[in-house]
Amino acid sequence: MNSQLIEQLGLRLGANGLPYEIPMHPQLVHLTLGLFIIGILFDIAGAIFPIERPIFKFLSLPTIRSRFFDVGWYNLVGAAVVTFFTIAFGFFELILANPPINQKSDWGLNAAWTMLLHGLGGILILGIIVAMTVWRGLQRYRWRKDASRQVQWSYLLAGIAMLGILYVHGTLGAQLGEQFGIHVTAAELLRKGKDPNLLLK
């Protein structure tokens, strides 16, 4: 971002190019991922509960099928809420990025294309997570509220496919930090010609 615009906004950027010490987007991304993955895994566990029941009985673990679906539902709702903040911080940190120009990622993309795909992908993922939460809520409270299996197989397949999308999208984000050094304090200092070993003690 233009340094004059940063001054007009009243932002004081640190060594990592952000107005705070630790980038927030990566922290929230991992919370989003954790909540979504746990939600899908518990819904899968609830769906195949009749197969698992003898194992739980053998291990003397008292389990109720509906509890698996409760964990799946509340984690998915949490993921939908957190993802709004994840995307907001992601775009804020993206506009403050100062990536290297003549460098390519392992996928052969430059920083600009990687940032563009990661940003647009984030909006797409937010839309999918919200849509899946609405779909899951309709199953829980309307369509399958009296059924022992609270989720549809098509929903679970969509959730598994979403895990693949999250993997690809997460790899793009990891490349921004690892290969382009965006908002990595040591990388930012090296770009400015400073020695991180002297400044980060």
Image (cartoon, rainbow, N blue to C red):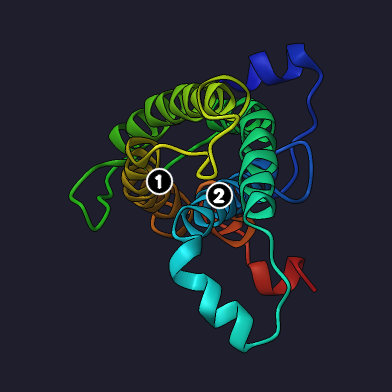
| Residue 33 on image: x %, y % | 55, 49
Q: Which mark is residue 166?
A: 1
| Residue 88 on image: x %, y % | 63, 25
| Residue 185 on image: x %, y % | 64, 56
Categorize mark 2 by other alpha carbons within 10 Å: few (<14), some (14-19), many (20+).
some
Quadrant assignment for the N terminus: top right
| Number of callouts | 2
Based on the displayed image, in which of its 4 quarters is residue 93 positioned? top right
Q: Secondary structure at mark 1?
A: helix
Rendered position, 140 above or below 114: above
Quadrant assignment for the C terminus: bottom right
At a point 53% along the width and 31% down the height, the residue shown is 94
Of 146 and 142, the residue lying toward us:
146
Name the amino acid type tagged 2: Leu
Name the amino acid type tagged 1: Leu
Based on the displayed image, in which of its 4 quarters is residue 82 positioned? top right
Of 137 and 184, the residue lying toward us:
137
**Of all residues shown, which one is farthest toward the left?**
108
Q: Secondary structure at mark 2?
A: helix
Q: Which residue is mark 2?
A: 33
Q: 178 left or right of 17? A: left
Q: Distance from label 1 to label 2 (Cα)?
A: 8 Å
Q: Which mark is residue 7?
A: none
| Residue 85 on image: x %, y % | 68, 29
Categorize mark 1 by other alpha carbons within 10 Å: few (<14), some (14-19), many (20+).
some
Rendered position, 133 above or below 60: above
Of 20 and 7, the residue lying toward us:
20
Contact between marks 1 and 2 (CB within 8 A): the answer is yes
Q: Earlier in the sequence, mark 1 or mark 2?
A: 2
Rendered position, 175 above or below 19: below
At a point 50% along the width and 22% down the height, the residue shown is 143
Q: 47 left or right of 171? A: right
